[in-house]
Amino acid sequence: MQHQIEHGPAFAWLKVQLAPGERIQAEAGAMVRRTSQLTMDTRLNAGRGAGFFVKIWAIFVAFARKLLGGETLFVNEFHGPQGGEVVLAPSLSGQISHQLLSSGRRLFVQSGSYLASTGTVDTRVRWGGLRAMFGGEGLILLECSGDGDLFVNSYGGIVAMPIDGRFVVDTGHIVAFDGTLDFRVKSVGGVKSFLFSGEGLVCEFSGQGTVYIQSRNMKALVGWLTPLLRG
Amino acid sequence: MYYEILYKPTHSLAIAHLAAGESVRAEASAMVGMTHNIGVQTQGAAGSGGLFKGLKRAFLGGESFFTNLFTAQGAAGQVSLAPQLCGDMIVHQLDGHHQLFIQGSSYVSAPDTVQLDTQFQGFKGFFTGESLFFLAASGQGPVLLNAFGAIEALDVNGELIIDTGHLVAFTSGIHYEVSKAAEGWISSYLSGEGLVLRVYGQGRVYLQTRNPSEYGRSVGSKLPPRGN
């Protein structure tokens, strides 16, 4: 498989040339174009070894999120006996980053930042804790493990931040982070700063690894737009 | 006349350079600035064709009913033009033989040597609400197009499947069929791809790296409901 990331950082898309029989799995709705020799299969992204109840739960989550307008947890898989080319793009303006996963390297990805993966890379939904849900910020993480390529997308540019010790990131700016890091979702200060600081929830990382941060925050865009809408 | 495009690709701005007496037509609200000797005439329809064509354009093409005709009077002049969204602009040169089919919202401007007509594809996305309308541009001269994101000019020779939301325009050497993204309606819905275009033949396709309605959905779904 060969790939090119073009038109970044503002409008990046991912071009992939698949050899005969090779496969790439992509977020539902990401396809821009494909050669007609490639077939597209749609399936639930519940993890390869998922049991029955996990699948039911994933279906429930997928439909709920589809109705609420989030990412769907459905994925499309592209493949063909002759190979071919497929182009994938995220929905927001921003960059795409290529990550290599192996048995020694897994990555947590903010669910909206997942674009595509190859090989045996498997994704499992992880909740960022109850507090993240109540905070309305819905930090839903995908734990990506296995061997292969992973492509993540961002809103804005992507900064790789190496961490040794502790580091705090606004939950809305997280793209992905290494599985070696410990993380905890919390509010910035007390109740007062939670309500008034404008920072909402942050993720506190500790240990050694890299956090990938996006330079823009979807929540901030929505917060700016909302009062401008006419009732 | 000719177009010059500045600030590519994110916040592109086009400048139409007109010789004395030349005219250029542009979408309503596209004008950013102009020299003092430019006369503006607001017309229904794409210039000629009258009321019916204008209504057809507005209702089917997703375009404004009105277009503005800018004419350089007495001396050369300039009109600068900008689209609504962030993204690139491109000039396609019509050779008098091939037509250019333009996705409604991608058309910005053309001189009056170019004729525009609306083509209804008769296919509406059942779930997604996407619909497909093309403006058919014919004649001779440059056509100014805008995109949401960057633009890829792709010379097609063979068969390709394209997400309609990423389509900007294509030349008349290309044949196409509108179809569901997957075999069944349910998997088409779940695949998130909505309608796709199966194109074949020989010609050029212009694609945009972002899909406006998908962007609208991802931001729009996080906004409070209408009427509150």
Image: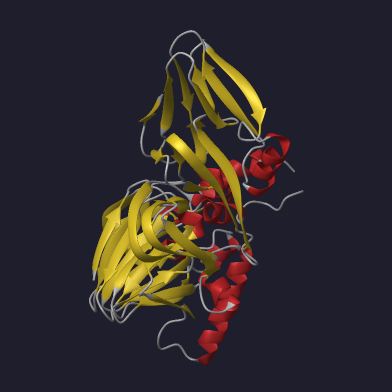
Q: Is residue B85 visible to the viewer in this orientation of the structure?
A: no
Horizontally, residue A23 falls left or right of residue A201, namely: left
Position above or below: A222 against B114? below
x and y, in percent, of residue B37 in the image: 51, 10
Residue A87 placement: quadrant? bottom left
List x then y, in percent, for residue A215.
39, 46
Question: Does the image show residue B220?
Answer: yes
Image point (29%, 56%), residue name: A5
| Foreground pick, B71 / B163 | B71
Placement of B32 over or under B192, stated as above or below: above
Residue A70, horizontal then vertical, whole percent: 55, 63
Q: Residue at the spot x=44%, y=52% of the render?
A: B172
User: Which residue is found at the position 32% from the left and 54% from the top?
Assistant: B155
Q: Is residue B53 left or right of residue A88?
A: right
Spot the residue most to the top: B74
Q: Is residue B122 left or right of residue B87?
A: right
* Residue A195 point in image, percent of width and height: 59, 48
